[in-house]
Image (spheres, rainbow, N blue to C red):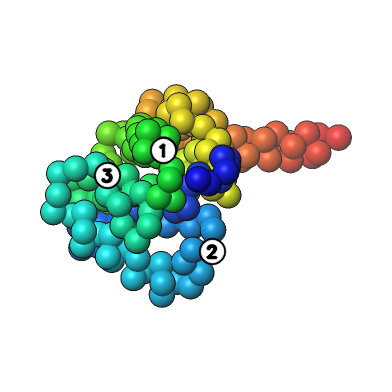
Amino acid sequence: MQEPSLYTIKAVFILDNDGRRLLAKYYDDTFPSMKEQMVFEKNVFNKTSRTESEIAFFGGMTIVYKNSIDLFLYVVGSSYENELMLMSVLTCLFESLNHMLRKNVEKRWLLENMDGAFLVLDEIVDGGVILESDPQQVIQKVNFRADDGGLTEQSVAQVLQSAKEQIKWSLLK
């Protein structure tokens, strides 16, 4: 029996319909090289892509996964890890991405918002430790709202307005 540990997540990755990596984070040295990670991901994809279940045991690890349109989301833990804990991370990841991508959890939208996807993942898991499992808290921390017009456009407009004001006041002095 293994001692309880906060380090419950070994990896989180998202693959496309062909089993190609779109996003991946590994939290321990079970697969130290990129080549070993890619082989593991391909093997997991081959085992899980044609089944309807949500859990698999592969290579001494517990894997929970979810399929969404043209994406496969995976959360990997050790063989003794609680499947419900892993599933809560997967559900949080999916629901947070669902909100961030405005209910379009598919490859094209994920690729266009990859920076946000990494932020979401970093809010949920850090170094293999589960930080958050409530999608509303993750969304609040990452500051994505479905009704926002876009943070970058608004920020640029604010910076330009501020610069205009500063120039105007410096010329009037």
Task: Name the outermost residue toward the front.
Answer: 1
Dot 1 or dot 3: first in sequence order is: 3
Q: Residue at x 27, y 49 (%)?
A: 56
Disc 3 residue type (three-letter): Ile
Tell me the element at label 2.
loop
Judging by the rendered image, the residue that carries numbered circle 3 is 55
Disc 1 residue type (three-letter): Asn
> Spatial distance from mark 3 to mark 2, Cα to Cα?
22 Å
Dot 3 or dot 2: first in sequence order is: 2
- Mark 2 neighbour class, 10 Å CA radius: few under 14, some 14 to 19, many 20 or more: few
The one nearer the camera, 156 or 35, is: 35
> Spatial distance from mark 1 to mark 3, Cα to Cα?
11 Å
Disc 2 residue type (three-letter): Asp
Residue 152: x and y, percent?
Answer: 50, 41
Position above or below: 53 against 141: below
Q: Which dot marks residue 139?
A: none
Q: Which residue is drawn at 46% across and 30% down?
A: 133
Residue 84: x and y, percent?
Answer: 37, 33
The one nearer the camera, 156 or 37, is: 37
Dot 1 or dot 2: first in sequence order is: 2
Tell me the element at label 1.
loop
Please name which of the two marks, 1 or 2, marks the residue nearer to the observer: 1
Query: How many numbered marks does the figure carry?
Result: 3
Judging by the rendered image, the residue that carries numbered circle 2 is 29
The one nearer the camera, 161 or 84, is: 84
Q: Residue at x 44, y 50 (%)?
A: 78
Examine the image and state in which quarter residue 105 appears.
top left
Is mark 1 in CB contact (under 8 Å) with mark 2?
no
Q: Which residue is drawn at 34% across and 53% down?
A: 14
- Mark 1 neighbour class, 10 Å CA radius: few under 14, some 14 to 19, many 20 or more: few
Please name which of the two marks, 1 or 3, marks the residue nearer to the observer: 1
Judging by the rendered image, the residue that carries numbered circle 1 is 82
